[in-house]
Image (cartoon, rainbow, N blue to C red):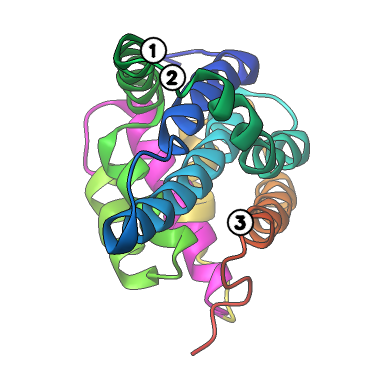
Amino acid sequence: MIFRKTVEDITVGLVSILCIFMLSACTGQTGKRATQGAVTGAAAGAASGVVSALIFGGDVGDAAARGAAWGASTGAVSGAIAGSREDRAAQKIQQNDAVAKLKAGIGEDAFAGLNALVQCKHPLAIGYAKTAQELDNRDFALAGLWLELIANADQGTADISQTLVTGIIKSDPEISSDTEVKAKMDKALTGLANIRREHNMDVTCKK
């Protein structure tokens, strides 16, 4: 793979993202929108960790479990760092670095698609997934395949796309069978549901 990262490296980056997301310096409607954005951003970051585990290795279920817990733990952490302007500036730099690392691994399109997916915006997520699949970067394209497969399954599509399964097997030398793809997909779906639940989001994507 082009960007062979460990899940632990991604975790460090995501914690930085979530800490800055959760800083509360706003009030009223602005504060409410910022809080909603923080929750969505935290969930999308956790979902990105799951997809990164699918591509770069590691236990998908473990990545999801840790991702779901990040949102609950960052409030206390951010409270300790939400002090001076210099502190916030430093955290902003860490956030930018962490986002850059995530996008370097799975690509901007997959990252945006996962943000849509955690909000149950399946058509938008699939649109980003298809765009990612056309990219020359193999890891980005693979992230797009996984994203589309998970999005289809998450919205209750009855049949698993054999084209997507075959594409994943061809793109990932660590996977050799349909059974492996489907097992990893099931773990990712469980992780996605847990992440939404921990962030008080719609778990079942009500129609």
Q: Position of residue 27 (x, y in %)?
A: 34, 53
CA–CA distance between discs 2 and 3?
25 Å
Based on the picture, tell me whether residue 151 belongs to the magenta stretch. yes
Crowd rating for badge 1 (residues with CA inside 10 Å; few <14, some 14–19, many 20+): few
CA–CA distance between discs 3 and 1?
26 Å
Residue in the picture at 69% in, 51% down: 191
Which amino acid lies under the numbered mark 1 shown in the image of this protein? Answer: Asp
Residue to which mark 2 is pinned: 83
Q: Quick check: can you spot residue 163?
A: no
Residue contact at pointers 1 and 2, CB within 8 angstroms: yes
Tag nearer the camera, 1 or 2 = 2
- Picture quarter containing residue 23? top left
Tag nearer the camera, 3 or 1 = 1
The front one of 28 and 51 is 28
Which amino acid lies under the numbered mark 2 shown in the image of this protein? Answer: Gly
Based on the picture, tell me whether residue 155 belongs to the magenta stretch. yes
Above/below status of 89 relative to 148: above
Residue to which mark 3 is pinned: 199
Residue to which mark 1 is pinned: 87
